Every structure is written in C-alpha cells, then in structure tokens.
C-alpha cells in the first residue's frame, strides 16, 4: 500500500512525524508537506510563481506552497502511479463545523479526493497536543478499515480525535458538520513602526452542536468521522432561482 502524507502545519510538525512513523508499519509512506505553517490556506493553489520541491534530512519532502500544492505536485509530478490513499494531519487543533471551509488540513485531503484518491483529514482536538499517539492510532485503524473495503468511488473523510489517551476514547461515531457562531471581530493594534495592523479574530463558539454533530461527538470523547463532498450547489434554491428568471 502506498500512502501520500501531507499536512498544513509544515513538514517539521510533530503531528506528521507521529503519523508517518505509525503508518510506515503498514504502508510505503511518502511525506510531501509545506515548508512552513500554512494553516487556514484552504484549497488555494499557487499560480503566481513556480514551486520548489526539496528533501529534508529525515526524508520528508517539502514544498514552498500550500497543502493543496503539495498534494497536487506529488500526485501529478512525482508519482508514476496514483497512491492508494492520501492522509492529511495530524493537525494540532480541531477542524469541525465551519472550520472545514478554511482548513488546510482538510484541503490537502480534498485535493486527493478530487484526483480520485480515497483521503483522510485527521485532527487532534486541542491546542495542547498531549496525545498525538491517540490520533495516529485512530488514523491507523481507519486506514486498515478503508483498505478492507471495496470502494466503488473515492471517499473524503474528516476525522476529529479527542486529545485523551487511546484507552479513554469512546466509540467512533459518524457525524455531520456542526456550525459556529459568527467569528470574533478582528483585533486592531499598532506595529513597532506605529502602523495600524489587524489580526483575524478568534473563531466563534459552537452554535449547532447537538447530538449527531462533530462538536457533540468530540465533547463526549468520541472520535468524529464525517464524510465530506465538494459539490457546493444549494439544491434547495434551484427552483427558487428558476422562478425568479420567469417572473
């Protein structure tokens, strides 16, 4: 089995090291990740400059671009054959609800999915990062599960893992995305040169976080497993717009 491993925290991040070490026991793993933290890069591609591909001392490859760049470059420029799976992570911090729109971790997996490859995005739900081993073991379990399935089409799975010891996890549950409140306002401050600068405000608190959502699952120590799709069509409004056009 051949796995392409990526992230959005950079090739030097501890999460990707844990994941590479665990998955290397069951697969041939190639790491292609950004040269620096590209959190929040979403699905952006770099089109205004060339990309470079370099290899670090630990054997990981890194690219001066986004997570999407990394997967696209690896699949269309490095490999002679498609990898069997793309795994993105382990992200430090949750990627639930509206976060998935902005997440570079999810974007890397999405690019694999768009290229026809089963893909996982794996996040550890805290900023402390105490139990990367838990998330890595969950990823290993899911890779084994997907390997056994006869997939008729690629899947894109968003995985959020509580930051607790593996033995404290409750059952993995299939969830839908929740929703957050509106984000906090930007923070305005002065630079050392007395120029006004702005920091993007913090994400809002969970609003739609009831049973069945990713927020609820993680809060109750379940691993959240959410199947994602890329079609952004608002099907319920198609007839509404058609009605506007005939008025």
Image (cartoon, helix red, strand yellow):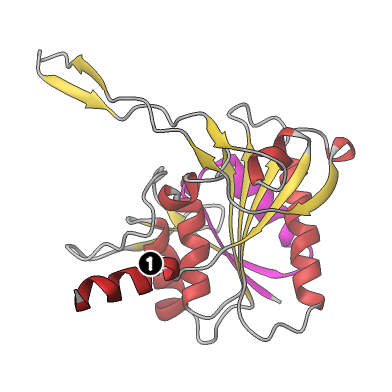
In what element is the residue under mark 1?
A: helix
Residue 50, by quadrant, is bottom left
Q: Residue sitting at 58 percent across and 29 percent down?
A: 127
Residue 26 seen anywhere in this rendered image of the structure: yes
Compare residues 224 and 51 and report the one nearer the observer. 224
Q: Position of residue 148 (x, y in %)?
A: 82, 77
Q: Quadrant of the N terminus?
A: bottom right
Q: Which residue is mark 1?
A: 237
Compared across the picture, whether 237 is left or right of 159 comes to left
Compare residues 35 and 96 and report the one nearer the observer. 96
Q: Quadrant of the C terminus?
A: bottom left
The answer to whether residue 199 is magenta is no
**Mark 1 surroundings within 10 Å by alpha-carbon count, few (fewer than 14), some (14 through 19), many (20 or more):** few
Q: Position of residue 99 (x, y in %)?
A: 48, 44
Q: Position of residue 167 (x, y in %)?
A: 90, 38
Depicted 170 relative to depicted 32: above or below: above
Compared across the picture, whether 43 is left or right of 122 comes to left
Compare residues 9 and 102 and report the one nearer the observer. 102
Q: Residue sitting at 10 percent across and 15 percent down?
A: 193
Compared across the picture, whether 86 is left or right of 49 comes to right
Depicted 189 relative to depicted 50: above or below: above
Residue 163 seen anywhere in this rendered image of the structure: no
Depicted 34 relative to depicted 222: above or below: below
> What segment is highlighted magenta in the picture?
2-30
Q: Residue sitting at 87 percent across and 35 percent down?
A: 168
Q: Position of residue 137 (x, y in %)?
A: 79, 51
Q: Residue sitting at 39 percent across and 31 percent down?
A: 183
């Amino acid at each position: 089995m051949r796995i392409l491993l990526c992230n959005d925290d950079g090739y030097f991040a501890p999460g990707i090291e844990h994941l590479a070490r665990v998955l290397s026991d069951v697969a041939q793993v190639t790491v292609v990740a950004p040269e620096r933290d590209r959190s929040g890069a979403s699905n952006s591609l770099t089109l205004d400059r060339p990309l470079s591909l370099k290899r670090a001392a630990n054997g990981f490859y890194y690219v001066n671009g986004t997570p999407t760049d990394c997967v696209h470059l690896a699949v269309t420029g490095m490999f002679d054959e498609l990898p069997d799976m793309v795994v993105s992570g382990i992200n430090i911090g949750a990627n639930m609800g509206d976060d998935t729109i902005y997440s570079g971790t999810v974007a890397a997996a999405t690019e694999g999915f768009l290229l026809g490859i089963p893909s996982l995005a794996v996040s550890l739900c805290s900023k402390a990062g105490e139990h990367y081993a838990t998330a890595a073991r969950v990823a290993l379990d899911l890779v084994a599960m997907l390997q056994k399935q006869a997939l008729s089409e690629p899947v894109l799975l968003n995985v959020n893992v509580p930051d607790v010891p593996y033995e404290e996890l409750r059952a993995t549950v299939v969830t839908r995305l929740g929703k957050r409140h509106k984000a906090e306002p930007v923070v305005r401050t002065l630079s050392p040169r007395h120029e006004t600068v702005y920091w993007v405000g913090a994400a809002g608190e969970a609003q739609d976080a009831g049973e069945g959502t990713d927020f609820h699952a993680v809060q109750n120590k379940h691993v959240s497993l959410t199947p994602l799709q890329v079609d952004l069509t608002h099907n319920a409004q198609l007839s509404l717009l058609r009605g506007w056009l005939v008025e």
